Image: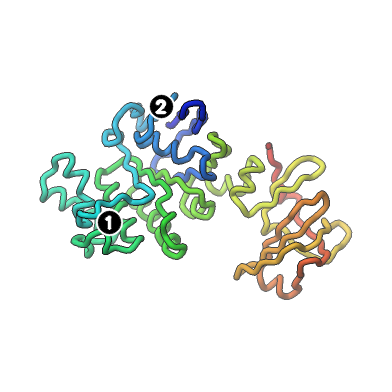
Amino acid sequence: MVAVTKRYGATVAVDAISYRFRSDSYTCLLGPSGCGKSSTLRMIAGHESISDGSVVLAGRDISTLPPAQRGTAMMFQNYALFPHLSVLDNVAFSLKMKGTGTSERHARAREMLELVDLTDLADRMPDQLSGGQQQRVALARALITRPQVLLLDEPLSALDPFLRIRMRGELRKLQKELGISFIHVTHGQDEALALADDIIVMNNAVIEQAGPARDVFNAPATRFVAQFMGGHNVVALPDGHFAIRTDAVSVTEPTQGAVEGNVTAVEYQGTHVSLSARITGDQEVMALIPDTTFFANPHHPGDRIGLHWDANDQHKLTA
C-alpha cells in the first residue's frame, strides 16, 4: 500500500496519491515527464524521502527503513554497472557488501546469470556487453537480493526499438516465473500495455486513473487518459465529451446519417492506414483502417468523406 506526498520546497511533485498494489503482479506507472511517477518509485525504494504518508509492504511500514532493509530492489535507467568489475562480480556486489563469502555469493550470482541467460558471459567486463546484455546484468544484480518487489525506472529507454520489444517480453516472462511484484515506470503507452497487469496513469502529480490495463485502455475516465493512452478520438457531442477508439471508426462516401468531414492526412502503417479528417467544430477524428480495406477504396487529403461509428463504441468521459 502506497499513500504518499512529495514536496520540493513549494513544489508538490506527488500530491497525496494512494494505491494498493496487487501482490505478484506487473504494474506500470505511466505518464508524461514531470508527472511524479519516478518520484513515487524512488519513495517506494527509499531513495527519496516521503514528505507525508507511508509505504507499507506485506503489512510492514517500510517508510523509514534504508533501501537495503525494505524488501525491494531497484533497477536504474542507466543500469549503473561497475566498469572495473566482471559481470559475475557486478551481480554479486550487494552480497559482498553484506559480508557473504566469495564461494556463496558467486554461486548465487551464477544462479541469477542462468536465470537471465548470461552464464557464458560471467567473466566479461561491462564494456564488452551489448545494451541488452547490460540490462540483463543489472536485472540479475537487482534480483540477487531476493526482493519482494522489483522496481524498474524506465529500464528499456536506452535500447533500440527491436531490442526494446524483445526485452519487454523477457521482463514479463521473468515476472511470471519469479512470482514477485514488478513496478515499472515508463512514459511509453505501448510498453505499459504490453507489460502490465495494472496501469496507473499519472498527470500533474496525481493519479488520473488506475486499474487493469485493458480497462484503462477501453474505458478511459478522462480526456487526458484517452489522449495519452492513444488509440482514441475525443469528440465533443451535444451530451458531453466521448472517447471513440480509432479502430471503431469506419469511412464511407458522404451519406445521410454519417458525420461528414474533410480528409487532412493519410499515413500508411503496414497492416493499417491511419486517416485523419476534420469535422464540424474544427475537431479532428482519426480512423484506423485495415490496409486492404483502405486500398480497395482509397481516399486522399482534401476528399469529402463520411465517418461512422456505433453508439455503443462511444465512451463518455467524466472530465
Question: Which residue is depicted at the point 54% across and 52% down?
Answer: 189
Image quadrant occupied by the C terminus = top right
Residue 203 visible in the shown view: yes
State the SS at label 2. strand
Q: Of tags 1 and 2, which is closer to the observer? A: 2
Instruction: Name which of mark 1 and mark 2 comes first in the sequence.
Output: 2
Residue 283: x and y, percent? 77, 51
> Of the numbered discs in the image, which one, if any, rests on residue 54?
2
Residue 266: x and y, percent? 70, 66
Q: Residue flagged by tag 2: what amino acid is it?
A: Ser
Instruction: Compare residues 104 and 95 and report the one nearer the observer.
Output: 95
State the SS at label 1. helix
Q: How is the image coloured?
A: rainbow
Question: Which residue is depicted at the point 38% across and 58% down?
Answer: 170
**Residue 123 vs residue 169: left or right?**
left
**Residue 13 vs residue 248: left or right?**
left
**Residue picked out by circle 1:** 115
Dot 1, crowdedness within 10 Å: few (<14), some or many (≥20)? some
Residue 272: x and y, percent? 64, 67
Instruction: Compare residues 101 and 199 and report the one nearer the observer.
Output: 101
219 shown above or below 124: above
Residue 110 visible in the shown view: no
Q: Residue flagged by tag 1: what amino acid is it?
A: Leu
Image quadrant occupied by the N terminus = top left
> Of the numbered discs in the image, which one, if any, rests on residue 106?
none
